[in-house]
Image: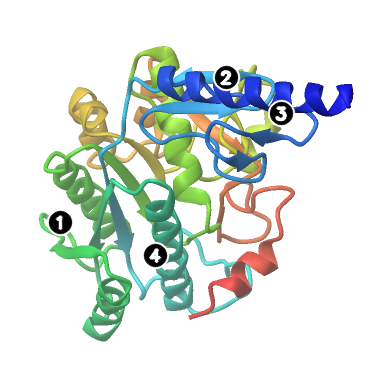
Amino acid sequence: MREIKKIKKTSFIKKVLIKICRIFGYELIDQSTLEFPVSNKNYQDLISIPGNKSISLGLGETSITRKVNALDIIVKTCTSVQLVSQNKKRIFEEDKLEYTFRTINSLTKSAKDLKKKFREIKVKFTIIDVNSPSSDVNKILSKISDEGFEMQHVPVEDIKDPKDNMATTMASIRQSFHHAKNCNDLIYFVEDDYIHKTEALAEMLFAYEKFSSIFQNEIFILSADYPYLYKKMSNSSILIGENTHWRTVQESLLTFMTSKKMIEKHFEKLIDMATNESNPFEKNLHKIYEKEKCFSPIPSLSIHCTNINSVFGLSPNIDLKKLWDDNKN
């Protein structure tokens, strides 16, 4: 009989404590069941609250002071050119349009997952295309529209030589940076040969809110874990995101996420990079990373579909074939 009274007393105290925690915005964890009684969740559920707080088991809570309100996804597409400066074949050896379509498929799937987790966020797609047949462009736009997202097609201007693949590519990059100045908050610049995991965009936004809140500054976030960065013995700081680790890097290719504020702050360097070709092409971007923090996921949240022997492509330790097959057109 005494044991029963003890259980009832414990249960009553627990209920009172939960109510108090709800009033003051605290969270509790039951280590015997890994349940979060305040929010009625368990360790497998989404524990963090976008725009409010990030919660990691073992690390506790981080208050979010930098809420993300909108995401513009700017995709630079070209279904007619295999590789701009190479005569090699890509992994899986398909026509270029297949990589473009699977990129779009993966991004719309990831954007839908993002909307489930960040319910208040506004998502918009912008397609900046060069030299693709109109039928391919219409197919891309229809796919995005059919999935319920706002989208637009921005024509590329200021092409010095329309027959020069590098000239058209640089014009597309310039156009993407100019367009970004009209965006509202975060911008994700994407090349059309990056196939994303479904959770990619949400993981990137969780990390953006958390890390920019910690460092009290805007940052850069990558979706790809580039293999060439493991060729160098560079020091990295490791941080914990929602469901993945992140490390600081000082180099990347041209698929990255950042804010409108960062684009405006470094606009001259970015436009110069897209106007005057250098070696490496992303040299100016790397200079920016010397001053600003850039984070890359471990493991990768996307794969860059280049040649299998390219150090700039296939991210290590992820199932490349599954990701490819899951996003079949």
Q: Quadrant of residue 94?
A: bottom right
Q: Which labelled disc corresponds to residue 128?
A: none
Amino acid type, mark 1: Lys
User: What residue does disc 4 label?
Assistant: 108
Report helix, strand or loop for mark 3.
loop
Q: Nearer the viewer, mark 1 or mark 3?
A: 3
Q: Earlier in the sequence, mark 3 or mark 2?
A: 2
Report helix, strand or loop for mark 4.
helix
Amino acid type, mark 3: Asp
Res 248 visible: no
At horizontal 59% and vertical 27% (from top left) the residue drawn is 15
Q: Nearer the viewer, mark 3 or mark 2?
A: 2
User: What residue does disc 1 label?
Assistant: 160
User: What residue does disc 3 label?
Assistant: 30
Q: Earlier in the sequence, mark 3 or mark 4?
A: 3
Determine whether 32 is above or below 225 in the image: above
Describe the colour scheme in one phrase. Answer: rainbow
Q: Earlier in the sequence, mark 4 or mark 1?
A: 4
Q: Is residue 238 left or right of residue 99?
A: right
Q: Position of residue 48 (x, y in %)?
A: 50, 34
Q: Earlier in the sequence, mark 1 or mark 2?
A: 2
Q: Position of residue 261 (x, y in %)?
A: 21, 27
Q: Earlier in the sequence, mark 4 or mark 2?
A: 2
